Image (spheres, coloured by chain):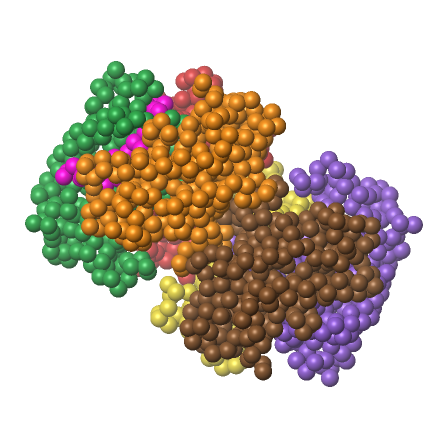
Chain colours: A green, B red, C yellow, D orange, E purple, F brown
Amino acid sequence: MRNDQRTTDEIRPITITLDFIKHPEGSVLIQVGETKVICNASIEDRVPPFMRGQGKGWITAEYAMLPRATDQRNIRESSKGKVSGRTMEIQRLIGRALRAVVDLDKIGERTVWVDCDVIQADGGTRTASITGAFVAIVQAFGKLLENKTLEKMPVTDFLAATSVGVLPNGTEVLDLNYEEDSKALVDMNIVMTSAEEFVEIQGTGEEATFTYNQLQGMLQLATNGLLEIMEKQKETLGELANRIGETKR
Amino acid sequence: MRNDQRTTDEIRPITITLDFIKHPEGSVLIQVGETKVICNASIEDRVPPFMRGQGKGWITAEYAMLPRATDQRNIRESSKGKVSGRTMEIQRLIGRALRAVVDLDKIGERTVWVDCDVIQADGGTRTASITGAFVAIVQAFGKLLENKTLEKMPVTDFLAATSVGVLPNGTEVLDLNYEEDSKALVDMNIVMTSAEEFVEIQGTGEEATFTYNQLQGMLQLATNGLLEIMEKQKETLGELANRIGETKR
Amino acid sequence: MRNDQRTTDEIRPITITLDFIKHPEGSVLIQVGETKVICNASIEDRVPPFMRGQGKGWITAEYAMLPRATDQRNIRESSKGKVSGRTMEIQRLIGRALRAVVDLDKIGERTVWVDCDVIQADGGTRTASITGAFVAIVQAFGKLLENKTLEKMPVTDFLAATSVGVLPNGTEVLDLNYEEDSKALVDMNIVMTSAEEFVEIQGTGEEATFTYNQLQGMLQLATNGLLEIMEKQKETLGELANRIGETKR
Amino acid sequence: MRNDQRTTDEIRPITITLDFIKHPEGSVLIQVGETKVICNASIEDRVPPFMRGQGKGWITAEYAMLPRATDQRNIRESSKGKVSGRTMEIQRLIGRALRAVVDLDKIGERTVWVDCDVIQADGGTRTASITGAFVAIVQAFGKLLENKTLEKMPVTDFLAATSVGVLPNGTEVLDLNYEEDSKALVDMNIVMTSAEEFVEIQGTGEEATFTYNQLQGMLQLATNGLLEIMEKQKETLGELANRIGETKR
Amino acid sequence: MRNDQRTTDEIRPITITLDFIKHPEGSVLIQVGETKVICNASIEDRVPPFMRGQGKGWITAEYAMLPRATDQRNIRESSKGKVSGRTMEIQRLIGRALRAVVDLDKIGERTVWVDCDVIQADGGTRTASITGAFVAIVQAFGKLLENKTLEKMPVTDFLAATSVGVLPNGTEVLDLNYEEDSKALVDMNIVMTSAEEFVEIQGTGEEATFTYNQLQGMLQLATNGLLEIMEKQKETLGELANRIGETKR
Amino acid sequence: MRNDQRTTDEIRPITITLDFIKHPEGSVLIQVGETKVICNASIEDRVPPFMRGQGKGWITAEYAMLPRATDQRNIRESSKGKVSGRTMEIQRLIGRALRAVVDLDKIGERTVWVDCDVIQADGGTRTASITGAFVAIVQAFGKLLENKTLEKMPVTDFLAATSVGVLPNGTEVLDLNYEEDSKALVDMNIVMTSAEEFVEIQGTGEEATFTYNQLQGMLQLATNGLLEIMEKQKETLGELANRIGETKR
C-alpha cells in the first residue's frame, strides 16, 4: 500500500480545466492529485533569430513555481536574478517534448510560447506540465484553425508524461507524489505518444542504481498510465481531439 | 456611462476565495472584475539581518505577473535576470501598506512573506493585491492564534486599496479597469483603513496635471468604494474579522 | 521649534547654480539646505525604440547618490550589479514629473536624459532633484532655441517639488531634513506647477496612518512652499523664464 | 558503414592520460576520438552549507568548453554573465552520476569538486566527461588513502558513460561523433556501472520518437560499449583499480 | 605649441579644495585643467574577510564618472549591471598606488574606502584621482590623529600621479588633456613619491611602439611635473603635511 | 641563487606546440616553466559594430584560467556571473599588445579572437599568453595567406612578453615564477618587439616603490630575455617567420 492508498500501478486523479485564463490562445489548469499547474500557450507571429527565413515555426517552454507552491517558501528566481539549473532542465524538456509531436513545417514562421506555472506542488510537476501543455497547444492551434490561419491541425499525435520510480522497499510504482519522490531510489520521467512511442526517457538513480529488469517494469507501468492519461486529454479536447494527426492522413 | 456599463462611483464585482493554495499559512484568490491575483502569506520564524535582536517582526511583499496575465505576453523577470522598476515599486507599496496595520512589536521575530501573483490582469492589480493580501495575512495570523503561538490578533484595523482617476472627458471615476487606466489623465491609488485614515496616496498625472478640486472628488469616490470593499473582506474572514483591533482594545 | 530652528512652514535655503558642469546642454547644482544635487540634462537626437516614428520626444531620468553622500557609506549600485527599488522609484518619479510640463509633441524625436546625482544628502533628495532638473531642462531647451533647432520653448509651466510630513508630536511640517524625515510618521512628496495644479502626490504612512484633515494641512504647507521655490527657479533662469508656456499662448 | 568507417557497435579509440595537470588531487586528459576533456578532481575539506553537520561528503561537478573547442567559436559563459541551460544540465548529470558510485558517508565532511573542461569537441563531451571524471576522482581518493586521511577507497563500483542513437536511416549506433549526433533522430546517454546497473538513462527524440524495440537495441549497444570503456579505466588506474568496491567487501 | 598653449613640460593649473563634502572623513575636489574629481575617503572599522585577524588595515578605491562628465553621455554602469574593464583597471590602480605610501600595519583593522567620482572629464582622470585621493586619505587619517584613534600619521611619503605621452608629431609631452590623449601614440601614467621613487609605471602604445630614448624623455617630464604637483598637495594640507613620514622617523 | 636554481637573468624553459587544438585557425600550447596556456586564434569575417564600414580589422583577446590551474581551486567566473577586474585587465593588455604589431588596415573587416586559457599556472600567465598568442595569430594569418584571402602577412614585427621584478633581498630578476612573484616587491611586465621597441610597460610596487636605477636594471634584463624568447617563436613558426614585416618592406 502506498502512502495515499493507491496501488502501485494507479495514477492520481487528473482534472484538466480548459480556458482557465482569458488572454492566452490556449489555457489550461491541470491538477494531478495535489499538483496544480497553469499551462498557457501563446502564439507569436515570428520565430527566434536563428530560425528566420526557413518558413517553419518553433515551440519554446518556460516553467516556474510560485514561491509557496511548496511546503517551504522558495526564493523567486527573479529576485535571485537567475534561473536555476533545475528550471532550465525542465523547460528544455517541456519544449523538446512538445516539438516531437508538432509538424513545425506546417505552422509558418510562428513561435508557440508555453508557460507552465506551478501554483501548488506535490510531485510530478514537470510531467503534469507536459500533459497540460499538450492540451493548451492543441487549443491554441484550434484558434488558428478557427480563424483560418491554419488549414490543418499541425499536432501529429497525443503526448503525455508521467513518472515512475523505485521505492526504498524495492517496489516499482507509477506517478509518484512528493513524499514518494523524495524517498525514491530511482526516479524516471517518461514522455510518450498515443502510438506508444517514446519521446523522452529520463531515468536517474540518485545515490543508487537500477537493473535492466527494474527498467522494464517501470516502462510497463508508465505505458499503461500514460494511455489512461491520454484518454483524459482526449475527453477534455472534445471535437478538437479528432483533428490530431490530420496532417499525416 | 463607462466602458463596462458601471456608474462613475461603482466598484467592480469582488470575490475573495480563502484557502486557494494548500501550503501557505494564508492563501487567497482575489478577483476584482477580470483581475485575478493569488495572495499567499507565509510565516517565517526569523527576521532579516537588519532587524535581528529587536524583538519585533517584519512584513515584506513580492509581486509578479504570469507572462500571459496580460493581452500581450511579457518576458519573465527571471529570464531578464532582473526585477523591473514597476515591480519593485509595487512590492514596496504592498509591504509598506500592510505594515501600517500590523503591530509588528506583537508578532515576535517573525517575517511574513506576502506573495501576490497576478494570474489575469485587467487593471488595478496592485490595489487588488493589497486588498487580497490583507485577508491572507489575517488568515495567517489566525493560524498562529489557533496554535497558541500568538495570543492576540496583531492586525489593528481593516485595510483595502482601490484606484481612482480622471478620464479624458474629465470625469472622475472609481476602480479603473485596464482600458480606462490606459487612457486616464490621472491615476491615483488609495490605501485606507476602516477608520477612514489614509495609509498611502499615490496620485500621478502622466503628461497631465490635476486640480485641488479633482483631488477632493477622487478622495471621496475612493473612500466610499473602500468601505464597500472592506465589507467584502469582513464577510470572507467570518469569525476572524472580529479579532482585528483586539491588541488596541 | 524644529531641529534646525525653522518654523513649520519654512523651507530651507535654496541655491541653484547654473552651468555647473561644462559638457551637458543643461547643468545645475541645486542646494536645498545641506542637500546638494548635480542635475544635468543631455539632449540626444533620437528616441527609445518604443517611440520611434511618432514624431514626438521623450524625457527620461536617472538618479544616483555618491557612496558617501550620506553619513554611512553606501555600496555603489554598479558594484552590486543592480539598481535598487528605491532608486528606480525615484527616477521613474522624476521622469514622469518633468514630462507633465513639457510638450513632447513639440521637441521632435529627441530624448532628454536627466541625470540627478546627489553628492551630499540631508533629506529631500528626490524633491531637490525634480526642482533642479526642471531648471536644467529649461536651460537645455534654451540651447535648442538659441541654435534655432526649436522655435518655441516646449516647457509649458514651472514645476517644483518639496516634501511635507507629520512629526512624531503630530505637527505638520514643510521640507523635512534627514533627521526629521527619519522620524516622521507620514512622509509626502508633492510635485506642483505654478498654476497650482498637482503633478504628483505621494503620501505614505510608514507603520502609521493619517487623517483627511492632516492631508489638507500638508497640501496647504506644500503649496505655499512650492510657490516660493518656483520664484527661485524663475530668478535663476532669468530671460529664459519668460519663454515658459509660450507654446500655449 | 559510418562516416568514420566504424561499425555500428564500435566505440571510438579512447586514451586516458593521468596527472595531466599538476595541482589537482586527481587530473586526467581523456580523449574519445577527437573529443578531448580535461577532468580535474579537487578535494575541499568542507561541505556546502545545506550538508553541514551530517558527517557525510558531497561531490559536485562543473563543465565548460573552451570557446574554440568547436568548429565555430562560442561566446564564453563568463562574458555572457550566465551559465547556459545546456551547461547546467550537463554538470548536474555528471555530479549525480559520480555520487551514485561513491559512499558519501565514508569520505567525511569533504567536497569533491570535479571540473570537466572540454578543450576539443567532436560529440559525446558529456559522456567522455563522466568517464574521465570517474578516473580523476578515484585518483583523488587515492591521494587520501596514501596520506592516511581515508582508510578505504569510498568508490563502490566502476562507472562510465557513452551515447547511443538512431541515425536518419534507422540504424542504431554506438558512441556518436559530432556529425552523427547532429543528424540523429534519437540521442541517448547511458551511465552504467561494471555491475551492469544503470545510473542514468537520458533518451531524447528531437522532433522524433522511438519505439520499444529501438530502445532495447540501444541499451544492448551501450552495455557492450561501456564494459569495453571500463576496461580502459581499469588499465589506466592500475593498482588503484583493485581497491574499488572495498567498502562493500 | 600644444592645443591649449602649454609648453611640452607644463602641467595644467591644479586646484585642490578640502572639505568639499561634509560627511566623509576626508573630502577633496581636485581640478586639473578642466578635469574635476570628487575624492572622498571613508574610514570603516573593519577589514575585508581575507584580512581579518592580521592586525593590519586595508585601502580600497572605487572610481566612477557621472554619465555626462564627458562630451557624449555614457550609460551608467549601475544600469548596465556591471563595471567595465576600464573602471576596474583604474580602481585597482588607485588602491594599489595609495597602499604603497601607507603603513598598513599602523592603522589597525580598518578599511579606508576611497571614492573618486569624476564630475567633469578632460583627460587624466585616473591620475587626478590618485593625486586628489592622496590628499583625502591624509585628511581622513588626520581625523583619526585628532580624536586620538591613531598616534602617528601612517602615510609615509607624498604621492602624486600624472600622464606623459608622445604626440603624433613625435613630441613628448606632460599632462595630456583629452584631445591630446585621444591622438597620442603613446600614453603613460606615472605614480611617484616625493622621494622620486616610482610606485607605478603604465606605458602603452596603442597600435604603436616607443623607444628606450622616448621612455627616458617621458620619465624626465613626469618627474618634474610630479614634484610640482606634490608642492600643491603640501600647500593644501598645511600643518598636516608635516606629519607625513613620521612613522619612519 | 633563485628558488628554482636559475640565475637572475635566466628565463625558464619555453616550449611552443603548434596545432594544439584542431578547430582554430591558429592554435598553440605554450609552456613557460610550469605555466601552460592554450592560445587559440579564431578569424571572424566581421568587425564589432563600432568599427563597421572603415575597411579595417580588429583584434580582441579573452583570458581565463581553469579553476584548478592554481594550487587552490578558484570559482569559475561563469558561476560568479562576472569577469574579475584582474581578468579584464589582462585581456585588455593582450589585445592591445597584439594590435601594436598588426597592420589592421591590411586585414579587411575581420576580427581575430584570441583566447588564452591557462590550464596550469606558475606565474607569468599574462606574459606567456602574449608570447603564445603572437604565434597563434601569425599561424592564423598564415591560413589566410594560404587560401589567398590575404596577399601579405599583416604582422609587422615579432612580439613577446616577460616579467621582471625585485625580490625582497633587493635583487632584480627575470621571468618570475609564482613563488617569486608572490613575494616580489616590484612586479613589471614588459611587452617588446624584435626591434627592441616597447609596446607596453606595466611596473607596480605593491606596498613598495622602486628607484630609477632599479627600473633601468629591470629593463635591461627584460630586453635580453625577450630577444631569447623571440628566437623560440621564430623557430616554432619556421617558414612563416620570414613573412613577418613584409607589408613594410
B246 on left or right of E134? left
Q: If the image is split into quadrants, where does the C terminus of chain C sit? A: bottom left
Tell me if residue C241 comes above or below residue A230 in the rendering: below
> Where residue C211 sits: x, y (%)?
48, 40
- Residue stretch in magenta: A178-203
> Where residue B93 sits: x, y (%)?
46, 43
Figure disc tally: 0
Q: Nearer the viewer, residue F59 or C246?
A: F59
Q: Is residue F228 visible?
A: yes
**Image quadrant in which you'd find residue C14:** bottom right
Q: Nearer the viewer, residue C191 or F100?
A: F100
> Where residue B64 sits: x, y (%)?
38, 43
Tell me which residue sits at (34%, 43%) in the image: D11
Q: Nearer the viewer, residue A47 or C149?
A: A47
Tell me which residue sits at (41%, 18%) in the image: B146
> Where residue D96 sits: x, y (%)?
41, 33
Q: Nearer the viewer, residue B217 or D163?
A: D163
Q: Is residue C116 visible?
A: no
Q: Does the segment drawn in magenta span residue A189?
A: yes
Q: Does the segment drawn in magenta span residue A120?
A: no
Residue at the farthest bottom position: E1
E87 on left or right of A200? right
Tell me which residue sits at (60%, 54%) in the image: F31
Tell me which residue sits at (20%, 47%) in the image: D170
Tell me if residue F17 comes above or below residue A195 in the rendering: below
